[in-house]
Amino acid sequence: EAGVAQSPRYKIIEKRQSVAFWCNPISGHATLYWYQQILGQGPKLLIQFQNNGVVDDSQLPKDRFSAERLKGVDSTLKIQPAKLEDSAVYLCASSFYGAEQYFGPGTRLTVT
Amino acid sequence: GESVGLHLPTLSVQEGDNSIINCAYSNSASDYFIWYKQESGKGPQFIIDIRSNMDKRQGQRVTVLLNKTVKHLSLQIAATQPGDSAVYFCAETPGATGRRALTFGSGTRLQVQP
């Protein structure tokens, strides 16, 4: 079974620029999560989707972050404009209706 | 790959010894707990889980203990191997089905000396 795929793996941008991350969950997994992991900390939830609907986006900085999951499969997370404090690893995870979560390898974002 | 947990507490053990990693949680409503292992450059990997109606659960070389009275969780790794070197996170969620997103602890780095 293929795991959660994410791209790109690394991204370096200047502050105030825009960036987008892509996630392809495990086939058949209805629930998709985006987490932000700052170096030295545990992952923190940004947004949770159930199929193509948002379940929880209470910790998503909506003035600059947006996410969508069209057709209930792939998802994109966008940051516009980026700030220095957005430097982190962005992890995507998926689960079969809230069971065990499987994580992708993450995208490491560096904002300079 | 990038290094996970540069400033995390570190547990250093000798190969073959048993390791105990501890975690305190704060949400008394949490009903489902998971331990994850994260190697450098990779996403967290599920190790073992436990529901709040249990106080102990065993897997292959790993045991999780839950003490809800003091909100404490521990992960025991038997006969620690060099491949166990990683950062370990406990995570919690309200709801025994685990349908809510996880709240992660701050992590502990395990270093296994050969």
Image: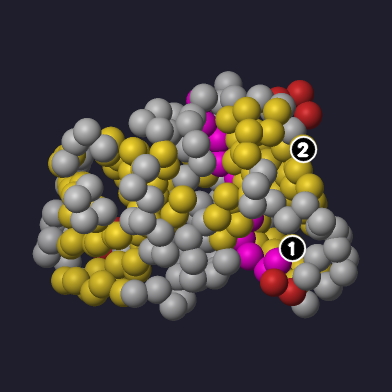
Question: What is the total number of numbered labels drawn onto the structure image?
Answer: 2
| Kind of element beneath mark 2 | strand
- The structure residue drawn at horizontal position 13% and vertical position 57%, both measured from the top left corner, is B79
Residue B107 in sight in this render: yes
- Residue drawn at the location 75% of the way across and 47% of the way down: A77
Name the N-terminal-most of marks 2 and 1. Answer: 1
Q: In x, y percent, where is residue B4?
A: 48, 67
Quadrant containing the N terminus of chain B in the rendered view? bottom right
Q: Is residue A93 above or below residue B89?
A: above
Identify the image quadrant of residue B23: bottom left
Q: Which residues are magenta?
A: A86-96
The quarter of the image holding the C terminus of chain B is bottom left
Q: In the image, is residue A50 above or below residue B29?
A: above
**Residue ID at (56%, 60%):** A37
Q: Which mark is residue A68?
A: 2
For label 1, the SS is strand
Q: Label for residue B21?
A: none
Decide: is A2 above or below A93. above
Residue A44: horizontal and vertical position, in percent? 55, 55
Q: In the figure, A112 relative to A18: above or below?
A: below
Residue of label 1: A11
Quadrant housing residue A36: bottom right
On what subunit does the disc labeled 2 rest? A
Q: Amino acid at mark 2?
A: Glu
